[in-house]
Image (cartoon, rainbow, N blue to C red):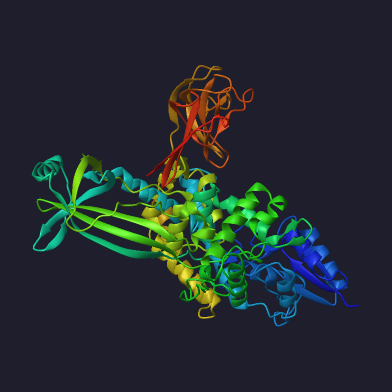
Amino acid sequence: MSKSLVIVESPAKAKTIGNLLNKKKYKVVASVGHIRDLPKSTLGIDVDNNYEPKYITIRGKGPIVAELKAEAKKSDNILLATDPDREGEAISWHLAHILKIDDKDKVRVEFNEITKEAINKAIDNPRRIDIDLVDAQQARRILDRLVGYKISPLLWKKIRRGLSAGRVQSVAVKLVCDREEEIDVFIPEEYWSIPAILKKDDKTFDSEFYGIEEDGKDKKIELSNEEEVNEVVNNMDKEKMIVRDVRKGQRRRNPYRPYTTSTLQQDAYGRLGFTSRKTMVIAQQLYEGINIKGKGTEGLITYMRTDSTRISDEAIGTTVNYLKKNYGEEYSQPRNYSGKKKKESQDAHEAIRPTLVTRHPAEIRDSLSEDQHKLYKLIWERFVSSQMTPAVYDTISVNVTTNGYIFRSSGSILKFDGFLKVYGTNHSEKDKEITELKEGDLVGLEKLDPTQHFTKPPARFTEASLIKTLEELGIGRPSTFAPTIGTIVSRDYVGFDQRSFVPTDLGILVNDLLTEYFSDIINEQFTAQLEENLDDIAEGEKKWREVVGGFYTEFAKILEVAEDEIKEMEIKDEVTDEICEKCGKNMVIKHGRYGKFLACPGYPECKNTKAIVEELGIECPKCGDQIIKRKSKRGRVFYGCNAFPDCDFVSWDEPIKEKCPECNGLLTRRRTKSKETTKCYNEECGYEKIEER
């Protein structure tokens, strides 16, 4: 019997597919990622020969290449089953090159999910390698190499060795620096609100000052100082507050689109606390296959690198049947979320969804790790709810007038949960009920609480908001977001304050230099335009050498000017009051791979170093020593005991000086965009307070 060789990238993927195929007919092996790339030691691009790349076998991949060639010789047929994106297409193209496969041969198999049905269907319908997709990926790789290998040495020479500049990462740093500058120059503006508690028949309801009645219309009034507030309060007839009108209606809240890579990373960050890198690692595991007890190994989700929200007709049909059977006809409303413009999505892909919608997260809980279960549940709920009916709210709006002033109340009550039945009550709005009122009712004033506010500066970027902004600006692609963020953190261009990005001194210095000399290249609009050009290459509308050449011609001119004009910059070490106990000198702050640390300036004679310790003035609940602020290797702030390793106290949430009202123990606080959670560190106590922000 003839045997076919199937080549994939990952050993885990190879194992799953190998178990799904007939072992007598197919042998599945892994290339373990890329096998060819540009050399690390040189530019690897002949700019004088139409930007011809010089690919070499990646160091250490020789034995794998030899094994692939040996297996290919023994096989009657070769199938290249790398991932269904541009990078996967390029890997297949490189494999075809080393195995001497003709580009015209139909050897490429593509599937969006690792299930038996999908794999067999793909193998029965092989196609040629798509050279347009390969060229798009090749152009991206060459552009990134030209930027990185031309600007980075400039940074080494002018600032310090080990720095790097990248086409996308530099824009990400610029966004963080620009936001910090906005915050620095922000001037708060005063404004006031006048919340009120009104009463009717012993029932109270909230209201707030809206404005005035003028020429038969409602005019909203912004209160900017205390004098304006006092004018309203003093001129109100507090004994004669009358319901002018009551408006009742309904509001529908539609379900969310299924996940793309970006929205999955954003939601996993906000709801699960996962970094983008962690999300992608776990999603890769779910895609490549999990051994489900009693069922075997199969992929649980579709391919997780996508910016499309399209859903296959088969998936929609299966989900609709599942909903009708488990929740009832009234909860089902099939939708396909395709229709994005070309170049906004790789529409050959689907959204991220479960491969089998009937595989409920609770049913496979025992087969998954805690993090795998959390992410699978997130994906399952988002997808299933996307095919459900809207939630319906009964709404009410009440206008109360007094001497021409208007106080407005609004409320809503969930009438029909719709998609929230699956998506979770934690996502629904809280019911805000207003007592039964009618036009002409006289209501009492229970409380008036004029409150001063100040406008706030724009929020710093978190991982989620930075990813969202990069996507909105058209910078990068699904596979680039997590590596980009990892790079700017590891290079010490940005640090963290709580869970928000803050540019470091080094990041600001590098950004200032790049912005001054490479502003035509390191900016949002130019980078987004390059992404569109790459999409045009993938569509066969542009040639990759023309796109690269158009970029490099201008880039080379700018580079030449920068090399001549930029003077060498010295980053002086910050001197501290900490005395080196070995030689008596004032220690300085140095920057290392994992952040800042103290070092003796007498190096190399004195090699003393210390961690930078920031005490909180709070005692450790386990041993009574001081709690200190620390950083993980990826730059994330956490809190631990100064007596580590003798004491193992650790917390990702910030300890506060306030004591638990129930057990007098340590309280910790976590802030998110929507709420602030204060809870007791003592799990046996269980005290928790949540405040909406």
Residue 693 location in percent, x, y?
37, 44
In this rendering, the answer to whether 565 lies above or below 64 is: above
Residue 611 location in percent, x, y?
54, 28
Among all residues in the image, which is located at the extreme front?
Answer: 201
Left or right relative to 645: residue 13? right
Among all residues in the image, which is located at the extreme bottom?
Answer: 104
Q: Quadrant of the N terminus?
A: bottom right
In this rendering, the answer to whether 612 lies above or below 161 is: above
Among all residues in the image, which is located at the extreme right?
Answer: 1
Which residue is at the front of the view, 122 or 335? Answer: 335
In this rendering, the answer to whether 608 lies above or below 204 is: above
Residue 95 location in percent, x, y?
73, 69
Left or right relative to 555: residue 456? left
Left or right relative to 397: residue 115? right
Residue 192 location in percent, x, y?
21, 44
Residue displayed at 35% across by 65% down: 250
Residue 568 appears in the figure = no
In this rendering, the answer to whether 429 lies above or below 324 is: above
Left or right relative to 239: residue 120? right
- Image-quadrant location for residue 644: top right
